[in-house]
Image (spheres, helix red, strand yellow):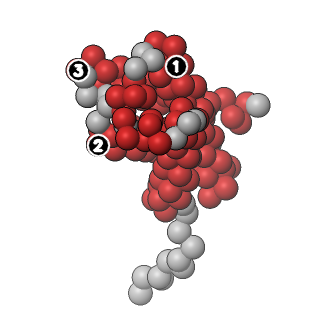
Amino acid sequence: MKNYALPIRFGIATSGCLIAYFLILSLLGLHTDVFYSLFNGIITGFGIYEAIKYFRLRNAERFNYGTGFVTGVITGCVATLIFTVFFALYSTELNTAFLGELSSAYAKDYSNFEGIVFVTVAIMGLATTLVLTLSFMQLFKASNNLKKKSA
């Protein structure tokens, strides 16, 4: 469990940033514009990047591609899970009109629109987590190239 404490903490901090960003958008009345959700990827990416970087600094002797990858995935999954739960509570309990405002066309066509939105939020977060973790590990992995001997 000690190996997972750092990515869980970074995941909680990342989800806190995602929630704060969503609430700020809500205060400004911009939370129904899907375009602003693109910034969620930047927030999640920053959290994953910092978690891997800090894990590498803290555990330089046992850092490898696998441990860095696990750190990034756990960070992103924790952040996604917490944000998805918050999003579900917000849209069903705090602002029941939110889903109708989000997409009035889909709300009329689908009988279980809430479930579709929650699954979409979770899948987007998990996909972002996987892609960004793979990308960031290219920066942090040790090179396998042989160093040229100087003459």
Disc 3/disc 2 C-alpha distance (Å): 14 Å
Near-viewer residue (83 or 7): 83
Q: Is residue 37 left or right of residue 112?
A: left
Task: Give the residue number, with chain letter if any, for mark 2.
Answer: 35
Task: Give the residue number, with chain letter if any, for mark 3.
Answer: 28
Residue at (25, 22) in percent of width and height: 29
Residue at (71, 36) in percent of width and height: 3
* Residue 2 coordinates in the image, percent (x, y): 73, 30
Could you tell which of marks 3 and 2 lies nearer the N-terminus? 3
Give the secondary structure at mark 3.
Answer: helix
Disc 1/disc 2 C-alpha distance (Å): 22 Å
* Residue 30 coordinates in the image, percent (x, y): 26, 28
Task: Give the residue number, with chain letter if any, for mark 1.
Answer: 92
Residue at (42, 16) in percent of width and height: 95
> Label 1 sits on what residue type?
Thr
> Label 2 sits on what residue type?
Phe
Disc 3/disc 1 C-alpha distance (Å): 20 Å
> Label 3 sits on what residue type?
Leu
Q: Is residue 87 visible?
A: yes
